[in-house]
Amino acid sequence: AQSVAQPEDQVNVAEGNPLTVKCTYSVSGNPYLFWYVQYPNRGLQFLLKYITGDNLVKGSYGFEAEFNKSQTSFHLKKPSALVSDSALYFCAVRGVNTGTASKLTFGTGTRLQVTL
Amino acid sequence: KAGVTQTPRYLIKTRGQQVTLSCSPISGHRSVSWYQQTPGQGLQFLFEYFSETQRNKGNFPGRFSGRQFSNSRSEMNVSTLELGDSALYLCASSLAGARNTEAFFGQGTRLTVV
């Protein structure tokens, strides 16, 4: 079975400072990893994905994520946070070698609060 | 290009009733998945349809069902509603349902059961 852990319910950071939202995963074989963001009363918006290749993945709105196979982690980062980044962030995994299963398994979400 | 469209956005139903939610995927996308989001359980996978066939199903009771039409539009139905079915129901579409492609989500249908 595949699973995702987001150990922090909330992350607080001042505007202009770097931010990190943590994610670890468990899956049989190689993973496909995704980050999504959710604003209040909205659906999930895709930020970035790791499929293969370079461990540092760049995505939308200046976000990036680092894949670390040995630590089974896929942390989301941004060099300089904005107040408008305040939202709920979800990490998700999909196994490569799981038959025909294509479902995304999500973490519990991390609320990012960026303050002035 | 239009995104994933879910209708209605909000619904209030009474226990015991049934409800049908609709999802129109991005044009050209053939895979549609449904998720339930609640504060207690988070995001949980309901089912996935591809080319009118259910390809995968989550751990939900048989009261939850779905279907996909030839134009890729999808509906999900919940019968005999319970208070615990109150949730945000999200639909996601992807190009061909391949595991390395991202899913694009609609804004969701907020279902309240009273």
Image: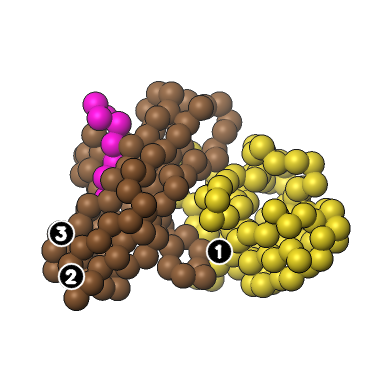
Chain colours: A brown, B yellow
Name which residue type carries label 3.
Answer: Pro
Task: Give the image location of residue B48, x and y in percent.
Answer: 64, 44
Q: Position of residue B4 (x, y in %)?
A: 57, 64
Nearer to us of marks 3 and 1 is 3
The residue indicated by pointer 1 is: B106
In percent of the image, x 14 and y 68: which residue is there? A16
Residue A101, can we see it? yes
Inter-mark Cα distance, 3 to 2? 8 Å
Q: Nearer the viewer, residue A65 or B13?
A: B13
Do the dots labelled 1 and 2 sit on one chain?
Answer: no
Which residues, given as a range, are shown in magenta? A69-76
Circle 1 packing at 10 Å, graded few (<14), some (14-19), many (20+), is many
Q: As shown in the figure, which amino acid type bears the numbered disc 1?
A: Gly
Pointer 2 residue: A15
- Would residue B92 appear left or right of B55 to someone viewing this image? left
- Look at mark 3 in the image and give the residue it sits on: A18
Question: Is residue A32 in view?
Answer: no
User: Which structural element holds mark 1?
Assistant: loop
Q: Position of residue A33 (x, y in %)?
A: 37, 41
SS under mark 2: loop
Question: Which numbered disc covers residue B16?
Answer: none
- In the rendered image, residue A45, in percent from the top left (x then y), is placed at 43, 61
Q: Is residue A15 left or right of residue A72?
A: left
Chain of the residue under label 2: A
Q: Is residue B77 left or right of residue A86?
A: right
